[in-house]
Image (cartoon, coloured by chain):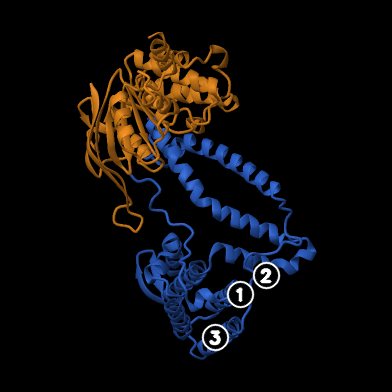
Chain colours: A blue, B orange
Amino acid sequence: MRFLNNMTLGQYVPVESLVHGLDPRCKIVGVLFCLVGVFMVRGPIGFLMWGLLFLALVSASRVPARLVLSTVRPVWILVVFTAVIHLFFTSGEPLFSWGVIEITREGAVMAARMGLRLVLLVMYAGLLTLTTSPTELADGLENLFSPLRRFGFPAHELAMMMTIALRFIPTLLNETERIMKAQIARGAELERGGPLKRLRAFIPVLVPLFVIVFQRADDLATAMEARNYTGGEGRSRMYPLKWSVRDSAALVFSVIFCFAAVLLDGRVLLP
Amino acid sequence: MSIDVKGLVHVYHPGTPLETKALDGVTFRAEKGSWLAVVGHTGSGKSTLAQHLNGLLLPTEGSVTVDGIEVRRGEGSLRKVRQKVGLVFQYPEQQLFEETVFKEVSFGPRNWGVPTDTLNERVEEALGLVGIGSDLFEASPLRLSGGEKRRVAIASVLSSGPDYLVLDEPTAGLDSPGRRQLLDLLSNLKALGRGIIHITHDMELALGLADVILVLDEGRSALWGRPDIILGELLERDVRGLVIPDMVRFAGRLRELGYDVPLTWEPSVLAEAIDRSHER
């Protein structure tokens, strides 16, 4: 019997590649440019350019295409929903009508545009987590947010919390599976009935899980304190971040690409 | 009446890079009113075996049959088997969730649809067996001491009225009075006709308590038989991770020195044998 085996979390694919080798700060900022760029293009040229760049990045990253595609899986309902809403509720020149349902030319364009934007958005963000380990990601974010520290922004603490949370996901999945089995052994029916019944049936799993989580958090805090953890000030790193020429080049390239995509796209405007 | 395991194979994550064979052709029988100890090193497949005995895992190959009911999907087989075979996981106190001890122990029987009039009786009986007094019935299970929690968790399995009780390292983390109390409880349950399947890494405990011992090594049944026979085999050949108890090694050394004493793990038996050989 399988319970939580199908869940894939912590998607990082540990291979050596050009994309993996970039500084996490470069990748985070680069992805931000890409995301803004994806939302600024409107026509086929723009989407084509972002799509091609994505394909190039995926092949450079040596991450299996199947894994990249699977990042869209959790949000495809949202994508379809958004596209459908735009398809039916945009006013304009009618293309097709059947009773109260009317599809306009503008609606079809908007649906395609929003759908593509969301898919690209998720896939670009997905490629970031596929090629950057959680620790690198947290380090990068901490570093990027550190200027805000003087305004009281807890950059180090947030990064530490994120790292710990990620670290404990597999542990908690194991615990959950163990408790589920223990309750099933006592006759609990976890997989029958409607959603409300299932939710109620999960109380015997959730309560012990919460107890364990608090227990673990307490133990971890004690263990960290016992080793003199005091937070961000003056703390050195095991793997210091290194910004190289390649990172600068990649960042400059993404900015230029972003402008180019928007400019070229603007010349072939759709009505 | 028995649990019959024949040629049991279990493969985790088949067809993936994580594929591992946890059990590889395990065969044995556990009888009602008898104490079977399953002994093996860490990773020998003990816990996987435990989950097969009440249908939480299903065999990749081979079969598990409980009182004639084969463990498999369909025809309510799993529900029947789970009622017959109670499974006490390692650290069972971590499964406690109800507001009161009494509700906690009635969770199982309620799931199995035991009618209300017999429910209270069952719960009181189970709590009585583990020695939890009625003053604690309305206490929160989360506020009890470690030993009490463990006993409430075992009561919550006993209240379903299982014929067999599978316990995965039931004494782990208990202090020695708590340990003694728990082992007495299991002997008591055996005397009441239940089948005890005690999973442990502790050979000494197994030798002293079990009627039959199954030794697992790397997912295979390395040895299966009465404790004295197992002991003889163990002295002949090494099984990974199993330590021959000090008392037995002591008896063995005495025999080498010419004393006429049996190879035993029981201090009192050995002491009497030494005493007798002195008289002579």
Give the quadrant of residue A69: bottom left
Q: CA distance from mark 3 to mark 1?
A: 14 Å
Judge from the rendering whether residue A214 lies leftward or rightward of residue B249; answer left or right.
Answer: right
Q: Classify mark 3: helix, strand or loop.
A: helix
Disc nearer the start of the sequence (3/2): 2
Give the quadrant of residue B121: top left
* Residue position for label 2: A144
Q: Classify mark 2: helix, strand or loop.
A: helix
Give yes or no for contact between labels 1 and 2 (Cβ–Cβ under 8 Å): yes
Q: Residue at x 30, y 20 (%)?
A: B34
Dot 3: chain letter: A
Dot 2: chain letter: A
Which amino acid does the dot numbered 1 rest on?
A: Val
Compare residues B121 and A177 and report the one nearer the observer. A177
Crowd class of label 2 (few under 14; some 14 to 19; many from 20; radius 10 Å):
some
Measuring from the top left, give residue A197's x and y in whole percent.
42, 37
Q: Residue at x 44, y 65 (%)?
A: A71
Does residue B109 appear anywhere in the picture? no
* Residue position for label 1: A29
Q: Which quadrant would the C terminus of chain B be assigned to in this image?
A: top left
Q: CA distance from mark 3 to mark 2?
A: 22 Å
* Residue position for label 3: A257
